[in-house]
Image (tube, grey):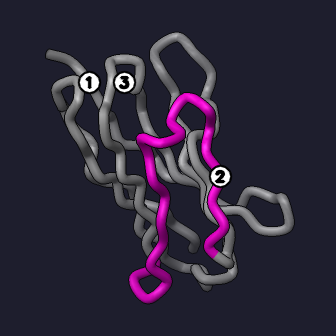
Amino acid sequence: QVQLVESGGGLVQPGGSLRLSCVASGMNFHLYNMDWYRRAPGEERVVVASISTGGITDYADSVKGRFTISRDNAKNTVYLQMDSLIPEDTAVYYCRSYIYGKTTAWGRGTQVTVSS
């Protein structure tokens, strides 16, 4: 059974950093593209960052230069390094796996709150 489990969320002050992790199980991780999404209060879930099987990355304009997505295939893990956090980054963050454009799994999410 495919499973994605996020961790690393929490409360951080503006300007601070967090690193989110998403550990995959039940799948050949290196074959899957991975995304990080977020859902802010009262808003729809939107993509934040993506990484392909080959390590090609893409970012939403709102996080470019502040967030970095990476993957470690040996650990079946995708990361999201978040720096220079602002209150607008407050959201539940989810990871997603997909292949051939088709979603294969979602994690349950981890809460990130940016507040002084």
The disc at residue 58 is: 2
Q: Earlier in the sequence, mark 1 or mark 2?
A: 2
Spatial CA distance of label 1 from label 2 is 23 Å
Spatial CA distance of label 1 from label 3 is 5 Å
Considering every residue shown, the one lying at the far bottom of the view is 74
Q: Which residue is mark 3?
A: 90
* Identity, as a three-letter code, of the amino acid under mark 3: Thr
Range drawn in magenta: 55-76
Quadrant of residue 77 within the rendered picture: bottom left
Q: Which residue is mark 1?
A: 114
* Identity, as a three-letter code, of the amino acid under mark 2: Asp
Residue 109: x percent and y percent? 43, 43
Q: Earlier in the sequence, mark 2 or mark 3?
A: 2
Q: Residues within 10 Å of mark 1 (few under 14, many from 20)?
A: some
Spatial CA distance of label 2 from label 3 is 20 Å
Check contact, mark 1 vs mark 3: CB within 8 A.
yes
Q: Residues within 10 Å of mark 2 (few under 14, many from 20)?
A: some
Check contact, mark 2 vs mark 3: CB within 8 A.
no
**Residue 83 included in the magenta stretch of the image:** no
Is 15 left or right of 96, judged from the image as shown?
left
Check contact, mark 1 vs mark 2: CB within 8 A.
no
Is 47 above or below relative to 22? above
Is 76 above or below relative to 48? below
* Identity, as a three-letter code, of the amino acid under mark 1: Val
